[in-house]
Amino acid sequence: PASAEEGFEIVRRRLFQPLTDQSQFVARDTVARAFRELYSNHQQEFPTECHSGDYEARLKAAYPIHPEIFDRLYSDWSTLVKFQRTRGVLRLMAAVIHNLWEKGDQNPLIMPCSIPLSDPYVQFELTRYLSDNWTPVIERDVDGPGSRPLQMDNEIPNLGRVSACRRVARTIYLGSAPTATAAHRGIEDRRIKLGCVMPGETAAVFGDAMRRLSSSATYLYQEGPRYWYSTQPTLTQMAAERAEDLKRNPESVSREIERRVRLETKNPGDFSRVHPFPQSGHDIPDDMDARLVVLGTDYPYVKDAENKARAAAIAMLETRGNAQRYYRNSLVFLAVDKTRLQDLDEAVRTYMAWNSIIDDRDRLDLTANQVKGAETQRTGADGVVTSRIPEAYQWLLVPVQQDFTRPVEWKPYRLVGQDSLAIRASKRMRSEELLLTRMAGTALRLDLDKIPLWRGDHVEVRQLADDYAQYCYLPRLKDTSVLIAAIEQGVGSLLWRQDTFAYADSYDESAGRYLGLCCGQQMNPLGSNLAGLVVNPAVAERQINTEAKVRPGGTGGTASDDSDGSGDTSDTGGGSLVDGTGSDGTAAPRRYYGSVSLDPERVGRDAAKIAEEVIAHLTGLVGAEVKVTMEIEVRVPTGAPESVVRTVTENARTLKFTSQGFEKE
């Protein structure tokens, strides 16, 4: 048997005419030098032996065939029992050279990537020593009119310009097919580039082709830097087949999407709650608080007459089971885009396929590296699903009504961003002023007058909460706490007569007066109490003026009953106003005075506390005249310096002290 070096000479003498012209020797040397410079300038991309000067001599000896072909034939293929190291190599190279000569191949050398495996004669010479099931592997994953590498070269221009995928696939096959059953299988990525890259080309392009092939080819395996073909489909192909099978089981895919959406909506954002994937309106409670309803994949949104999402939203908004829905202004809907649903479905099927392979690892007898690779693929597929859910669920459907005379309209809003579903929806709702998390007392007064929402001279707080949750022409509130906060802020406004309203605990029909009337001052927090009344400010002021009139004899006007019957008519921050008389009919106190010593180190803090807890209550009384003075007395045993006397005197004069001065005892 001939060695690799002897094979160079045998093939050249049998299949090529000898070099005789000086120009032919120059051409040979030029080619060898160009390859040698390529390998020297990019040492990290190619095997170590290519960097030495001896490799240029090998290039010249094997010319016009690359030495890597002989290395693979004599090192790998010669291990096969039936392979003939001399005749086998001659027959193979004769078929290769004939095909390339017929096609007019202009490459500088015949390299592993040049071997035309799609040619029947060449293919026969490389499969006659292998099992019969290698032929479909070549046709599908290596070379041929319908092969995956050819498709990828046609689809990706950057790879197609140099036929990178086909050249990589041919090189991997030549270097791995004879050792497919060996313990140390495959060919290293550096040696693949050695068999592919020519001077003037970039090695990175072929590295990209390797990565793309390993993730999509049916029979191509990868383990670290080594690649090899096998007659058994790869896990990638198995996952693709399982993902395709899931098309016949859409219910399981829908359940996985629903599970993902439920995880996505655990954070409700500004909504009180989220209702994912209801089957009908019966699954959605009829409550006052604002909620987001995420429609299932059976109701995709599309801009045409067959808009299943809008039809489902209308049905769920109008009815709850067999009954009419009362609180219609509390629901908004989120629907999946019909086109993006296809991408989401594909991503979910891929994730489920990889997950099933990991679950079946014992039955499939996967190696530790295969399990690790499958887990990596599953993690990647999981990330794709996570990113595609917000891309798919992008349509917010909101029922709006211009006024009570017009019908309800449905406005679609496209959501953007990568936040969770409810957070994106609530952000868009806030920006469009479709969901209020805070409300001013003045805004509530505008609604009371404009709609109007008054029921006579007042309206129950519970009735207001019902109105805002029921009618779509009113602002949509997050929950009743927004309304209660607006009432408390409005009652505490000093401009309550013009801009806001008053509050009362109840209304005494027999006496024709409000009990626990409060306005223009801080009231006790209502909490979740909806039993009180919002009172028209004009009516409230009329009652206050009437009860403030002095009775004949100076005892005051009509007595004002307190709301709880305790007889205490003092201001507690939310009780009734002082009306001029006490519970025993005697004259109510009409003057207050008080003095207090302040900590000279904490004057600002103490004064602010007094203003908040004492003075604020008194200034809120109708007609009250409040006068606050500050008295300062300082004793300095050693006497005040002249500079301090001058500074204090000037500052006191600037601050308009009515009286001030220093004294000598």
Image (cartoon, grey):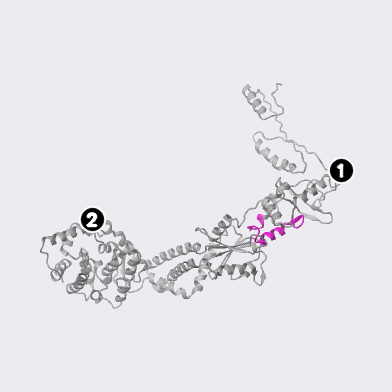
Q: Quadrant of the N terminus?
A: bottom left
Return the residue at label 2: 40
Instruction: Work out whether residue 646 or residue 357 is closer to the camera in this orientation and state it.
Output: 646
Q: Amino acid at mark 2?
A: Ser
Disc 1 is placed on an element classified as loop
From the viewer's perspective, tell me whether residue 653 is left or right of residue 424.
right
Most extreme residue toward the front is 405
Q: Position of residue 226 (x, y in %)?
A: 31, 65
Q: Amino acid at mark 1?
A: Thr
- The answer to which image quadrant residue 268 occupies is bottom right
Q: Position of residue 323 (x, y in %)?
A: 67, 70
Return the residue at label 1: 555
Instruction: Work out whether residue 188 or residue 489 is closer to the camera in this orientation and state it.
Output: 489
**Circle on res. 197:** none
In the depicted structure, whether residue 204 falls above or below residue 85: above
Most extreme residue toward the left is 20
Asked if residue 444 lies in the magenta stretch, the reply is no
Q: Position of residue 552 (x, y in %)?
A: 89, 43
Q: Residue drawn at (10%, 64%), measured in percent from left and top?
A: 20
Q: Residues within 10 Å of mark 2 (few under 14, many from 20)?
A: some
The span picked out in magenta is 455-482
Q: Position of residue 445 (x, y in %)?
A: 70, 52
Asked if residue 458 lies in the magenta stretch, the reply is yes
